[in-house]
Amino acid sequence: MEHLVRSCFKTGGYVYARSASDLAARYGLPRVARLASNENPKPPSPAAIARGVLALSEVNRYPDETTRGLVEALRATHGDYHFVTGVGMDGVIETLMRVLVDPGDLVVVSSPTFSFYRLAALAQSADVRLSPRKEDFSVDPVSFLRDARGAKCAFLCSPNNPTGNATPPDVIDEIAGAVEGVLFLDNAYVEFSPYDYLPLLKKHDNLVIGRTFSKAYSLAGLRVGYAMVPEWLEPFFSRAATPHSLNRVSSAAAAGALTDTAHLQETVSHNHKWRQYIMDTCRYPHIASDANFVLFDVSPRTGDEVTGLLAERGIIVRSCTSFTGMDNHYIRVSIGDAWENELFVREINAL
Ligand SMILES: *Cc1c(COP(=O)(O)O)cnc(C)c1O
């Protein structure tokens, strides 16, 4: 019966990190350093947990379709923007593709980058074009704008996954002002960067900024994402979204997480300290990072080889060979707990 499946799902798909429990069982390891998914090693804020637990007692009712509580908390934190929410930023991206893309429409992706833009666009039968970054992984606005001509939507990630570097707001400003379609700016890691892109929203009615609670806010397991969108887009987004997709527990916990600014500050200062440590002490060259992970160039070894060797030693990192448009000699390493970062540096330097 497989002939019934659409061609876009016959191969490919999202690449997940190796499972820590499988690895521990296979090599008989007492503990495993999980440095492959850019999660926060710190547990969620007690305020997030308390709000989530409270919401659990009301799950006999569907959630409010506008996720009003969360949207109000987002407004209180970030300002008076138009917010949409979803099941992770992934869910927001998927809904946006449903709103914008008819079969054959052009979607452009600044690459190498996060894989899900392309997957979500292909699921809507888009024509996806990858626009290469420069050799140092910075964005060349001239070539990006040339590639984005005629596109319904252009994706740009800053700080970029997996390279870690951010694109300055003035470059985003230039690009947003010149593309004909929507510019989706993925800010999954913005809390770890020096840049504030929000002022650009007032200037551009084609700019969407995507954000997530999965990284700095320690809520990856609850799947909460959101975006600031231009006002015109909001009603269409609601119409295209899966009904009640963001559940009560997740949205209540996310609203709670926003109240705990100390949790965020500790997360960011831990990240900056250990990001500097692994950049300074790992013997392989790195790309300067504005995120909660660092890209290392492990040549002459390959990313797959180093990832395999580290796995045997109880450390899961991400080989970047599956990122389209990237050579095979890179690994991406998340900032973890102190012991994880120290173990990573010790073991990679001893390979
Ligand atoms: C993790 C990540 C996301 C997805 O976030 P979710 O909210 O967990 O779906 C989006 N974009 C980038 C670049 C990411 O690294």
Image (spheres, helix red, strand yellow):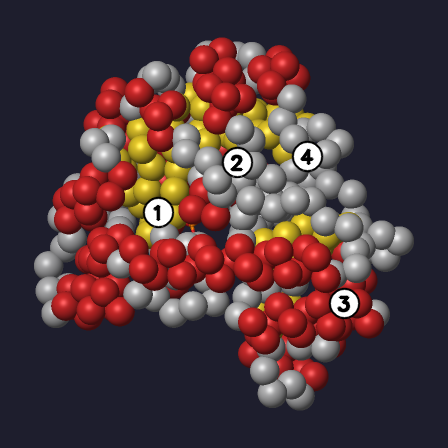
The mark that comes first in sequence, 3 or 2, is 2
Structural crowding at the residue carrying mark 4, measured as other residues with C-alpha within 10 Å and reported as few (<14), some (14–19) or many (≥20): many
Q: Position of residue 114 (x, y in %)?
A: 56, 43
Picture layout, residue 256 above or below residue 103: below
Residue behind mark 4: 137
Q: Position of residue 278 (x, y in %)?
A: 66, 60
Q: What residue do we see at 71% from left, 68% from top?
A: 345
Q: Which corner quadrant of the image does residue 108 belong to?
A: top right
Q: What residue do we see at 24% from left, 23% from top?
A: 231
Q: What residue do we see at 24% from left, 43% from top?
A: 77
Depth check, mark 3 against mark 1: the one in front is 3
Kind of residue at disc 1: Gly
Structural crowding at the residue carrying mark 3, measured as other residues with C-alpha within 10 Å and reported as few (<14), some (14–19) or many (≥20): some
Please tell me whether mark 3 sits on a helix, a strand or a loop: helix
Q: Could you say which is closer to the camera, residue 270 or residue 203?
A: 270
Residue behind mark 3: 348
Please tell me whether mark 4 sits on a helix, a strand or a loop: loop
Residue behind mark 1: 225
Q: Does residue 2 appear in the picture of this structure?
A: no
Please tell me whether mark 2 sits on a helix, a strand or a loop: strand
Residue behind mark 2: 157
